[in-house]
Amino acid sequence: MTSAENALQINNIALVGNPNCGKTSLFNHLTGARQKVANYAGVTVERKEGFLKLPSGRQVRILDLPGAYSLEATSPDEAITRAVCLGELASEKVPDLLVCVVDATNLRLHLGFALEIRQLGRPMLLVLNMMDEAKRRGIQIDSQKLAQEMGVPVVETVAVKSSGISDLLQTLEQADFKPATPLKQLDRHAEANRILASAVVIPDFRDRRTEMLDRLFLHPVLGLLSLAILMFVVFQAVFAWAAPFMDGIEAGFGWLSEVAGPYISNDLLRSLVVDGIIAGAGGVVVFLPQILILFFFILVLEETGYLPRAAFLLDKLMFKAGLSGRAFIPLLSSFACAIPGIMATRTINDPRDRLTTIMVAPLMTCSARLPVYALLIGAFIPAQQVWGLFNLQGLVLFALYFAGIVSALLVSYVIKLLRRDKSEHALIMELPTYRIPDFRNVLLGVYERGMIFLKRVGGIIFALTVILWFLCTFPQPPVDATMPAIDYSLAGRLGHFIQPIFAPLGFTWEICIALIPAMAAREVVVAALGTVYAMSGDEDAIAQGLGQYITGEQGWGLATGLALLVWFIFAPQCLATLATVKRETGSWRYVAIMTIYLFGLAYLASLVTYQVAHYYWG
């Protein structure tokens, strides 16, 4: 059989490798925009698939498997990598070729996993990535000798610069791939040392750039200070940069409603399209800029090698609260939206730590809370200076964010006490060298996460918005109706029914009604309140505007406004998040526990806030 004939059999390729080896950068360069993201059947781990064209024009399918340190799986991601490599996943084709990507600057660690892949006895190609950094450090690698020792072809690349890509494509086209020969009774550590001694010269190199930066970023005081400043800059950028895009999106959907409305003569159909579909879609898309900007910063920090250091820096503090340093990145993502934050917990190896992180992620102040906070703070908190330096409204907003963080730490600590966890703790994490981010990789990652958000979250909120429109519209009022139409609807009746339960919190029946559609997404409560007052025929609310009305003589009062602010710190007003928890844990039990404890915290905190505020300010 000729090499060309054999190459034609390589139609399905799987990329494998340790985290931080540059595997995803290589995948992005090979496939570009010709890739799609989905879930593996029956599990929550994401499946990244793409296609590339070889020099001959033939198309090859590539699967980017999750990063793994070993085939002895300790996390959901590693379990999927193991299953695909062994051909145990029924929904996935067995790869014709395993392309193992290793960091050329860290072969002592990465070569062990490559040897484990070789032991599978499948056709294999070894890719030495980050060769430019290896040469900068004076590391000499004899690729031919390494290929001879490993018994598989070897290709050198620099994925972030597209260097070596053509050599890789030629190898995929022409190489005569054969099943790798497993070794009996292999001691991977000893074998890796033997191969390194034979094919690699590693000088006594000190990476002074990394050492200098680590003296700052890993310092127990300066490191925490620099992290706090960095997070402050990131969140300021998220809110400041997103504002014009969000205004543009709101204006666009408003224009679409005005254009579409006159073309629909039927009142119910017009209400469904304008108030349900268009408004529901706009309520989702409007927060996309904030999420994309936050993920842009997260990906840049990840590409530079900083995020693992932040996790390492916070590990001791978070462990005392029942979490691990690995929870830092998921919780950081939850400030944009709890859904991608919960999904990001898959990288946490310990199932108990992963579950705890999932349970507290909704307590992070996500972007959906901002419209509610903006309305209530602007209405009830005066815009005045405190100590001549700070804006009082800004301090209240900071306090709301801080309350969410403290609550998450307290809840995780209680979970640790309840599970009687007295185990010792050690965070083993690779700290990669600092590097300039590959912005092609960053932008593709931002695009990928944006599409995931729109498809998964948008679909859920869109469907719920239509359902809730139905609840607020039907049944229609009778011909001799004397009350506003909303009073006769299912949502209106439910609002009046549950109002006595929320009366100790100072919530009016209008607030109770607005909390129902707000279950779809927290930000809906602002529009829902305006709709409720408008459908109630309250001309004062329409004329004055919602913000001015709720602070007027017929409005809520300061105590009610503060109680509602506190309610949204804790309440699980997001069914999409609960659906994600079900998907990630595979159990309705944890969804029920989360719902009960969050609603319990929200009710208790709002009750105390209202009663204290009502006592002092009336």
Image (cartoon, grey):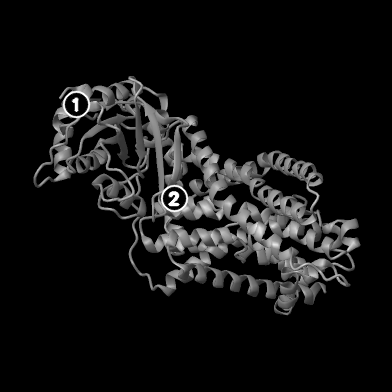
Kindly tell me whether residue 218 is visible in this rendering.
no
Q: Residue at x 30, y 50 (%)?
A: 89
Mark 2 or mark 1: whose residue is earlier in sequence: 1
Residue type (three-letter) at the residue carrying disc 2: Ala
Task: Give the crowd class for mark 1: few <14, some 14-19, many >=20 residues within 10 Å.
Answer: some
When asked about the image quadrant of residue 417, the answer is bottom left
Classify 294 as above or below 482: above
Q: Is residue 230 above or below residue 594?
A: above
Q: Secondary structure at mark 2?
A: helix
Residue type, label 1: Asp
What residue appears at the point 66 percent right and 41 percent down from the top-left corner? Answer: 242
- Left or right of residue 299: residue 183: left
Q: Nearer the viewer, residue 575 or 214?
A: 575
- What residue is at 69 percent from the left and 57 percent from the top? 524
Of residue 602 and residue 4, the one placed in the foreground of this image is 4
Q: Is residue 340 visible?
A: yes
Q: Secondary structure at mark 1?
A: loop
x, y percentage for residue 291? 59, 45
Which residue lies under the disc numbered 1?
A: 176
Whole-percent x, y for residue 365 in the image: 61, 56
- Label 2 Cα neighbours within 10 Å, binned few <14 / some 14-19 / many ≥20: some
Q: What percent of the width, then of the height, locates residue 263? A: 79, 44
Query: Which mark is in front, 2 or 1?
Result: 1
In this picture, residue 445 sits left or right of residue 279: left
Q: Which residue is mark 2?
A: 311
Q: Nearer the viewer, residue 26 or 80?
A: 80
User: Left or right: where does residue 247 sit relative to residue 29?
Assistant: right
Whole-percent x and y of residue 149?
14, 31
8 on left or right of 478: left
Badge number at residue 248: none
Q: Quadrant of the C terminus?
A: bottom right
